[in-house]
């Protein structure tokens, strides 16, 4: 697919998708949603992509839904609206939230409304200290729909959630880190160092173990005690079957005094026929 609203680049097994409508502060129009479905579906099966980073071109991460092209222009066209909504939900609620590799939101600037679902769907979110956040829907007469309220419910304390939903006040990156909307905030000029350090840490882990650990957490969140126990046992057994019980390699290296699991990684590639 010929992308017009995003850029997809891979270097050293880290793929960066850049929302690329800086003249619209990277607001998500229907075309962007379709392109994101295509890009994420492709990258899911691309072995060259081990870590996925999402960011925005220029000084904005993403200004939410495109208020004109997504909301206003499609209001009278229910089928076009339904197509756009399905694509919008598919990439954020399914493809990105359950992406089988680690995902990092590199928040370089404005992050409003619908962009909260991108932040929440990523495993990690690192915000530059100049970034500005807000649930601005109330300011233009809407409520935060399209799963925005759902992710706010999942991530934030009810006091913070209702404060920002009902006042529409914007807040800075430090506040976003304090209320745990993002993993951390860093000075703007350190954003990419921090993202690259995290990507390197993640690349040092065995990808199948990372994937299963993420799935175990994400799919297991709403289970009760008994369900969670059974689910985690099944997931561990599936991981052993898929990885050839790679954990034994880790424990054997520990027994041989080669490393300390509390302080570092085992050599998961050791003896791998592909090496
Ligand atoms: N939808 C559609 N267009 C948007 C947009 C959005 N969400 N956010 C910005 N744009 C457009 C502006 O209309 C403007 O277009 P124009 O040059 O044709 O007038 C252009 O992007 C630049 O925006 P501008 O407002 O001039 O930039 P700014 O840097 O002064 O302010 C924001 C940036 C993000 C604070 C401001 O654009 C804004 O409030 N946007 C809406 C954010 C929002 O409510 N998002 C929630 C949607 S769910």
Image (cartoon, rainbow, N blue to C red):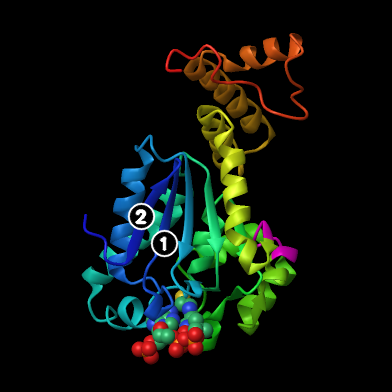
Q: Name the residue that disc number 1 marks.
A: 18
Q: Residues within 10 Å of mark 2 (few under 14, many from 20)?
A: some
Q: Which quadrant of the figure contains the N terminus?
A: bottom left
Q: Nearer the viewer, residue 206 or 214?
A: 206
Residue 265 sits inside the magenta stretch: no
Q: Main secondary structure of the magenta part?
A: loop
Q: Is residue 26 left or right of residue 189?
A: left
Q: Residues within 10 Å of mark 1 (few under 14, many from 20)?
A: many
Residue 6 is labelled as none
Asked if the residues shown at circle 1 and circle 2 are in contact, with their CB atoms under 8 angstroms apart, the answer is yes
> Where's residue 40, x and y in %?
36, 49
Residues drawn in magenta: 177-184
Q: Name the residue that disc number 2 marks.
A: 8
Which residue is drawn at the image coordinates 65% and 38% (left, top)? 224
Count of marks, rendered view: 2
Which residue is drawn at the image coordinates 62% and 66% (left, top)? 189
Disc 1 Cβ-to-ligand 1 distance below 8 Å: no
Q: How far apart in space, not on screen, are marks 1 and 2 (Cα)?
A: 7 Å
Which residue is drawn at the image coordinates 77% and 30% (left, top)? 263
Q: Is residue 93 above or below residue 177?
A: above
Q: Is residue 242 above or below residue 165?
A: above
Residue 61 shows in the view? yes
């Amino acid at each position: 697919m010929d992308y017009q609203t995003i850029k997809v680049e891979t270097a050293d097994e880290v793929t960066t998708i850049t929302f690329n409508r800086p003249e619209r502060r990277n607001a998500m129009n229907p075309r962007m949603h379709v392109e994101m479905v295509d890009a994420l579906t492709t990258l899911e099966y691309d072995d060259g992509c081990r870590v996925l980073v999402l960011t925005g071109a220029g000084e904005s991460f993403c200004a939410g839904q495109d208020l004109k092209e997504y909301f206003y222009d499609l209001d009278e066209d229910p089928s076009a609206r339904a197509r756009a909504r399905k694509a919008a939900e598919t990439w954020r609620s399914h493809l990105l939230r359950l992406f089988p590799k680690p995902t990092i939101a590199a928040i370089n600037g404005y992050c409003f409304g619908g962009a909260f679902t991108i932040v929440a769907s990523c495993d990690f979110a690192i915000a530059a200290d100049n970034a500005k956040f807000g649930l601005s829907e109330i300011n233009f007469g809407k409520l935060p729909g399209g799963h925005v309220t759902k992710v706010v419910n999942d991530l934030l304390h009810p006091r913070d959630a209702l404060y920002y939903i009902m006042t529409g006040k914007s807040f800075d990156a430090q506040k976003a880190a304090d209320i745990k909307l993002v993993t951390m905030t860093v000075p703007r000029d350190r954003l990419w160092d921090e993202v690259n350090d995290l990507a390197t840490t993640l690349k040092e882990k065995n990808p199948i173990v990372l994937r299963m650990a993420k799935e175990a957490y994400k799919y297991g969140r709403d289970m009760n005690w008994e369900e969670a126990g059974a689910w985690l046992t099944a997931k561990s057994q599936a991981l052993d079957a898929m990885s050839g019980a790679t954990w034994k390699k880790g424990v054997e290296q520990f027994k041989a005094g080669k490393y300390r699991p509390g302080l570092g990684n085992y050599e998961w590639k050791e003896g791998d026929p592909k090496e």
